[in-house]
Amino acid sequence: MWLYVVALLLGLFLLRRWHRERQTVPRLSEKHLVGLVEVTLSLLPLLRRARGRVVNVASVMGRMSFFGGGYCPSKYGVEAFSDSLRLEMRNFGVKVCVIEPGYFKTMISNVENLEKNFHDSWKKLPEEIKTSYGEGYLRQFVAMLKLLQKTYSSDLSLVTNCMEHALTSLHPRSRYSAGWDAKLLYIPLSYLPSALSDALFAAFYPKSVGKA
């Protein structure tokens, strides 16, 4: 066994505090991070012996976090684990790569499905949280997603081409950016000072009522 791919692509958007974080964060971490780490570590003896490769598919949300829930933290974890593993495996001849896709048109990123989930979640929220955010927050968030959906790419070969290069190239890259938005928007933004990137995202972010 000389190659190993962990494909963890984009998942559901989660609104800050909306889905009970004590439940969603562990569940998403187990799905996107803990499982990835456990499978990788279990295969490390074979990878070291064969001087193989690890290709982890993270997300641009592992570089820029602008919504709540457990998804972004789990993707940051994939990035951190891959970076430390790459250094550790260097002397064994094992190459570790990370693929960071932008937004793509998939069933998971379908706005109609997300909108239904958001409305269902809103109905289950305590009145305190509904009052703090206001119903306008939900409408703005859905409107933002619909606007964002227009920029989604439907060409998934942009991701699979990165996978192919990472697995078969003599000199694979440490990181691959898949999609125009990853290359031209999210990755460049990740290098900006936090104050500037926050200001840019805040211009488009839904506005909550702000009541404690």
Image (cartoon, helix red, strand yellow):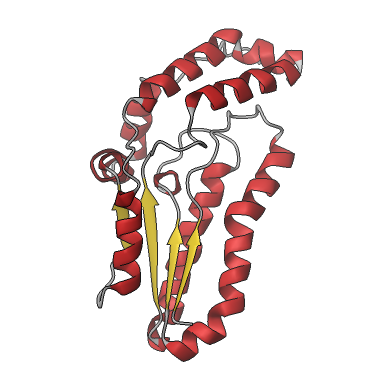
Residue 127 placement, left or right of 144: right
20 or 162, which lies in front?
A: 162
Place of residue 1 in the rendered image (x, y in percent of width and height, measured from the top left): 49, 82
Picture quadrant of residue 106: top left
In the depicted structure, whether residue 38 falls above or below residue 212: below
Residue at 76% across, 18% down = 126
Residue 20 placement, left or right of 48: right
Place of residue 125 in the rendered image (x, y in percent of width and height, measured from the top left): 73, 20
Judge whether residue 174 can be spotted in this image: no
Total labels drawn: 0
In the depicted structure, whether residue 207 falls above or below residue 181: above
Residue 141 placement, left or right of 120: left
Residue at the far bottom: name it. 49
Place of residue 188 in the rendered image (x, y in percent of width and height, measured from the top left): 26, 44
In the depicted structure, whether residue 167 falls above or below residue 200: below
8 or 65, which lies in front?
A: 8
Q: Quadrant of the image for the C terminus?
A: top right
Place of residue 49 in the rendered image (x, y in percent of width and height, measured from the top left): 48, 91
Judge whether residue 195 can be spotted in this image: yes
Residue at 75% across, 13% down = 127
116 or 27, which lies in front?
A: 116
Residue at 63% across, 61% down = 35
